[in-house]
């Protein structure tokens, strides 16, 4: 059954970037396992925030080099003036009317495949809206001390999770959780 989940690499102290907004330190030791690479094969669409989208620098590079060659739905208040390059598999839709709309459109595009959500702010919106089926978190072997916390701004929620699986490698630990209850 297709699901909506978010995946993030975080520092052990819960940050998705460092005090300068950079993510490279988190990914220096990140190596996706064969199981994670196999999971990516079942992704039919991606929802991401504008900041995550712009991290690529040259957004035209998505068409030839992005790990997910599927429809991308970028949540933004201001779509770019120039539409980035696309190919026969990877397309861009700039969504300006909220997380519910982005997920609805992504599910339609993904058909029977999964929808993955990337980016801290968008993931927070996904959780608040009660639209996450699962969470996938990879813990980088670093303490950053400052930066952007993944689970910021969720003070009014209590979310119950059920651990589905844990993947451990010499570089990292990844934990998959099923969202079983949101209040």
Image: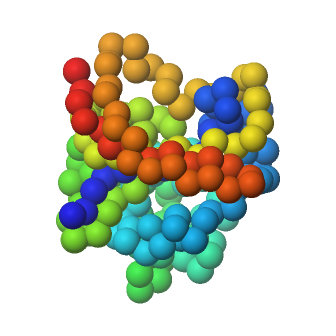
User: Residue at image x 67%, y 32%?
Assistant: 12
Q: Is residue 149 above or below residue 121?
A: above
On the rendered image, what quadrant is the N terminus found in?
Answer: bottom left
Q: Position of residue 53 (x, y in %)?
A: 55, 54
Viewer-proximal residue, 166 or 178? Answer: 166
User: Residue at image x 31%, y 28%?
Assistant: 160
Q: How many marks?
A: 0
**Quadrant hosting residue 155:** top left
Colour mode of the rendering: rainbow
24 lies left or right of 46: right
User: Residue at image x 32%, y 63%?
Assistant: 114
Q: Is residue 109 above or below residue 103?
A: below
Q: Position of residue 170 (x, y in %)?
A: 74, 54
Q: Position of residue 122 (x, y in %)?
A: 42, 40
- The residue positioned farthest toward the top in the image shown: 156
Q: Position of residue 79 (x, y in %)?
A: 44, 52
Viewer-proximal residue, 136 or 15? Answer: 136
User: Residue at image x 38%, y 48%?
Assistant: 164
Viewer-proximal residue, 133 or 103? Answer: 133
On the rendered image, what quadrant is the C terminus found in?
Answer: top left
125 lies left or right of 84: left
- Residue 55 visible, this angle: no
- Residue 34 visible, this angle: yes
86 lies left or right of 178: right
161 lies left or right of 53: left
């Amino acid at each position: 059954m297709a699901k909506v989940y978010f995946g993030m690499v975080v520092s052990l102290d819960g940050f998705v970037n460092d005090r300068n907004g950079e993510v490279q330190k988190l990914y220096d030791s990140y190596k996706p396992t064969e199981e994670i690479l196999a999971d990516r094969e079942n992704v039919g669409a991606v929802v991401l925030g504008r900041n995550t989208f712009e991290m690529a620098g040259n957004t035209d590079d998505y068409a030839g080099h992005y790990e997910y060659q599927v429809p991308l739905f970028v949540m933004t208040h201001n779509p770019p003036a120039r539409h980035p390059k696309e190919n026969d598999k990877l397309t861009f839709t700039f969504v300006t009317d909220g997380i519910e709309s982005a997920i609805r459109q992504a599910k339609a595009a993904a058909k029977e495949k999964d929808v993955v959500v990337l980016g801290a702010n968008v993931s927070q919106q996904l959780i608040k809206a009660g639209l996450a089926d699962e969470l996938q978190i990879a813990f980088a072997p670093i303490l950053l001390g400052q930066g952007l916390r993944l689970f910021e701004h969720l003070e009014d929620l209590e979310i119950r999770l059920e651990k589905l699986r844990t993947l451990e490698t010499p570089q990292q630990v990844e934990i998959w959780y099923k969202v079983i209850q949101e209040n």
